Image (cartoon, rainbow, N blue to C red):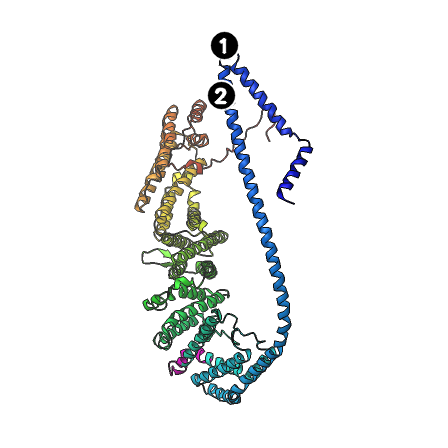
């Protein structure tokens, strides 16, 4: 059927089928009409606009014609493209029919050839067998010599003729490889190749070669491992071993490159290759170094012999380094960098070894030896810091021998061990000190004429020596050791203060048990002053304050020293008060008023005590003398407040005031002769006695308020009870004057000025012995 008939039939069928109207087309037409109507209503909204209707109609007709022409052009180009595509499809269909016919012919020819290929299998098997027999015949002379060569090579290995043995071994391996290669066939051949049975047969026949490799390697590594010792006598075996290693390395590289090449990509590596004997060489050297160092010790490593062990390691390393640099380096190729390898092996061994040593239970001296060796000796110019070695290898690149955390743990262990030792020594020193206090002789006197014992010397020397030793490691360890020492000193001073308190209690129980009680108290004060100087010196050495549990007590020892000194001074004053007590009981009484020997006796006691105070170091010497003066005046005024003597007349008041003035002048003269400054703070204690004497000496009681106001201005801590007791001693003050004076005191209590030391606060006025009875009750 022609194409024209087909087209005519299609057109006829199209005429019979009703034309389908698309909904989209109708919707588009409606939208177009609506848009046109909207446009027209906007343009022709006025009658005068209808005059331009013809122009609008003409313009829209032209636009419609233009659109129709463009649509016809698009449809025409689309139809032409469809026609061209149909033509291409017809040509492709024709070509596919031609290819199908050709493939059918090829299939028929291949079936004919496959039947003829099966006849060549027998010929291929015969060829393979022939090739194997040819290889066996050509290698028969070598195969007969294999066993004899193996035996001969074994004798060469046993006699350490390593180069000759290796040459024979290489020849045997070459024979083995050639036999296997010939049995396998040429590369790229289509034969069956080497079977597993044939390969196993060849391997078994050449099994002696594998044993020779192991035997040679054993002797080779024995020579390399003992190279440091052998090379001092005869370096030839070591040189032979290095040459063998290089030969094997070259063979490994050859086979690896052959396998990587394009032609030999499928060629298997010979058995046992690559041997990597160069890497094994350095591994054996490293193991030999470790074994050599582990055996270097004249004493047992753990315990007192650790320092000797480290010293022996140092000498062994430096001796071996000299051998490596001057002998072994000449026996190996330059690229071996044998010195660098030896340094690396040494460093790695020492890292492992010192890590093990750090985990032991070491004593303080052993820890110090390890720290000193790691931080100072190892990196010094005597060892790895030598310029020639630094040029070979930077040790810092290998890392520290002991990590920073490990060093901190070692330092903490060291401080703990030293602390235990310091604590024991301080305990013993305190026991010796307590024993010295019981001696029946006065304490030792130093070059300055002051009492002292052995306690501060022992403590100071011990702490300074520990700080000096720790400084040899680092300033941080020195600071940590000093802080630990100060912590232990604070504990010692707390026990020392308790011992002083117990010493005072024993003396109060039996004052005659130790006639040198006061002397040893003064020695304790001098000891504390010495320890304070040493403590301040140690604190000045601190360049940093490490974050540890000792850092919180940097001022603790000074506070403990101050507490101990205060307690000792208090006991000294108690002893002075005990000696003054018999005289104080007679003071300001009728007997004292009639007899004049009480105050001179008191001055004698003060003089004896102040002479002993000269055996105390400054500033406590002056402090004790001032406290002596203060105590005397306080007890004098306390005796006055006890109202042992109440004046009955003006004569008695004048006599009392005169005697009090004489006592004040006598006390002042004696105190000045003992080099005691009369002023303590802003108060002159002896001047108080004169002021009280002036109050008693006032003729007119009505004028007392003026004198008492002046007394209050000088001594603002005086209260109504003190003034009332003073008025009672006068015995002539009327009630109205007493009331006005007490009211004045109540209304004009001045505040204590800065730096003022209260004196009346220490004086308690005893309660009145007069009994007051209520009017409604009967007195008992």
Question: Which range of residues does the magenta coloring cover?
Answer: 222-239
Q: Are marks 1 and 2 in contact (CB under 8 Å)?
A: no
Q: Identify the residue shown where x is 57% and y is 83%.
A: 130
Residue 142 lies, in percent from the top left, at 51, 87
Along the viewing direction, whichever of 372 and 515 lies nearer the viewer: 372
Quadrant, the N terminus: top right
Using the image, determine if residue 341 lies above or below residue 736. Answer: below
Quadrant, the C terminus: top right
Give left or right: position of 772 versus 647. right
Q: Secondary structure at mark 2?
A: helix
Residue 293 lies, in percent from the top left, at 44, 73
Residue 732: image quadrant is top left
Residue 390: image quadrant is bottom left
Q: Identify the residue shown where x is 57% and y is 77%.
A: 194
Residue 692 lies, in percent from the top left, at 38, 33
Give left or right: position of 266 versus 331. right
CA gap, disc 1 to disc 2? 19 Å
In the picture of the structure, the residue carrying the numbered disc 2 is 59
In the picture of the structure, the residue carrying the numbered disc 1 is 48
Q: Secondary structure at mark 1?
A: helix
Crowding at mark 2 (Cα within 10 Å: few <14, some 14-19, many 20+):
few
Tell me, yes or no, whether the highlighted magenta stretch contains residue 349: no
Along the viewing direction, whichever of 618 and 191 lies nearer the viewer: 191
């Amino acid at each position: 059927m022609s194409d024209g008939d087909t087209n005519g039939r299609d057109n006829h069928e199209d005429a019979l089928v009703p034309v389908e109207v698309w909904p989209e087309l109708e919707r588009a037409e409606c939208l177009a009409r609506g848009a046109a109507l909207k446009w027209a209503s906007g343009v022709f909204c006025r009658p005068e606009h209808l005059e331009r209707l013809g122009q609008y109609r003409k313009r829209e007709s032209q636009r419609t014609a233009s659109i129709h022409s463009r649509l016809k052009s698009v449809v025409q180009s689309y139809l032409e493209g469809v026609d061209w595509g149909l033509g291409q499809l017809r040509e492709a269909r024709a070509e596919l029919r031609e290819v199908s016919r050709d493939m059918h012919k090829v299939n028929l020819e291949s079936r004919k050839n496959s039947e003829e290929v099966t006849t060549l299998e027998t010929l291929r098997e015969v060829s393979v067998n022939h090739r194997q027999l040819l290889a066996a015949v050509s290698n028969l002379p070598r195969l007969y010599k294999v066993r004899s060569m193996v035996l001969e090579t074994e004798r060469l290995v046993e006699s350490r003729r390593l180069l000759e043995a290796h040459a024979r071994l290489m020849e045997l391996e070459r024979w083995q490889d050639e036999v296997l290669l010939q049995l396998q066939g040429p590369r790229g051949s289509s034969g069956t190749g080497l079977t597993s049975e044939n390969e196993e047969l060849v391997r078994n026949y050449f099994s002696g070669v594998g044993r020779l490799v192991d035997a040679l390697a054993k002797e080779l590594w024995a020579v390399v491992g003992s190279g440091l010792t052998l090379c001092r006598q005869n370096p030839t075996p070591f040189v032979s071993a290095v040459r063998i290693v290089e030969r094997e390395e070259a063979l490994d590289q050859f086979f690896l490159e052959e396998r990587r090449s394009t032609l030999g990509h499928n060629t298997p590596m010979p058995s046992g290759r690559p041997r990597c004997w160069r890497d094994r060489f350095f591994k054996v050297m490293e193991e030999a170094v470790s074994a050599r160092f582990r055996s270097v010790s004249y004493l047992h490593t753990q315990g007192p012999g650790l320092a000797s062990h480290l010293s022996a390691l140092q000498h062994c390393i430096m001796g071996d380094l000299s051998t490596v640099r001057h002998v072994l380096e000449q026996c190996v190729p330059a690229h071996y960098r044998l010195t660098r390898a030896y340094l690396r092996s040494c460093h790695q061994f020492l890292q492992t070894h010192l890590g093990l040593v750090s985990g032991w239970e070491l004593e303080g001296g052993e820890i110090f030896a390890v720290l000193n060796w790691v931080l100072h000796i190892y990196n010094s110019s005597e060892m790895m810091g030598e310029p020639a070695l630094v040029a070979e290898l930077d040790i810092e690149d290998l890392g520290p021998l002991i990590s920073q955390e490990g060093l901190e743990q070692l330092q903490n262990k060291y401080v703990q061990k030293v602390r235990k030792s310091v604590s024991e020594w301080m305990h013993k020193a305190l026991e010796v000190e307590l024993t010295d206090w019981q001696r029946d002789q006065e304490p030792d006197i130093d070059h300055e004429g002051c009492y002292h014992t052995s306690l501060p010397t022992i403590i100071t020397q011990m702490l300074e020596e520990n700080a000096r030793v720790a400084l040899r490691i680092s300033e941080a360890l020195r600071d940590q050791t000093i802080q630990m020492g100060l912590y232990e000193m604070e504990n010692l001073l707390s026990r020392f203060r308790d011992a002083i308190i117990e010493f005072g209690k024993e003396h109060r129980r039996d004052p005659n048990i130790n006639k040198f009680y006061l002397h040893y108290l003064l020695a304790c004060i001098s000891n504390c002053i010495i320890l304070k100087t040493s403590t301040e010196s140690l604190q000045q050495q601190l360049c940093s304050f490490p974050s540890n549990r000792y850092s919180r007590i940097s001022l603790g020892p000074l506070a403990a020293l101050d507490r101990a000194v205060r307690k000792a001074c208090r006991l000294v004053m108690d002893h002075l008060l005990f000696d003054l007590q018999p005289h104080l009981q007679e003071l300001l009484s009728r007997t004292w008023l009639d007899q004049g020997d009480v105050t001179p006796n008191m001055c004698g006691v003060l003089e004896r005590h102040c002479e002993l105070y000269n055996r105390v170091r400054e500033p406590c010497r002056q402090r004790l003398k001032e406290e002596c003066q203060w105590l005397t005046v306080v007890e004098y005024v306390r005796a006055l407040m006890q109202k042992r003597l109440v004046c009955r007349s003006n004569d008695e008041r004048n006599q009392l005031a005169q005697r009090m003035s004489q006592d004040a002048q006598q006390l002042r003269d004696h105190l000045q002769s003992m080099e005691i400054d009369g002023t303590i703070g802003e108060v002159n204690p002896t001047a108080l006695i004169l002021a009280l004497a002036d109050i008693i000496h006032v003729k007119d009681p009505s004028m007392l308020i003026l004198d008492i106001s002046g007394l209050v201005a000088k001594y603002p801590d005086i209260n109504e009870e003190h003034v009332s007791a003073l008025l009672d001693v006068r015995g002539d003050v009327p009630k109205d004057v007493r009331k006005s004076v007490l009211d004045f005191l109540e209304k004009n209590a001045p505040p204590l000025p800065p730096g003022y030391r209260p004196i009346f606060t220490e004086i308690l006025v005893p309660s009145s012995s007069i009994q007051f009875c209520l009017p409604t009750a009967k007195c008992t």
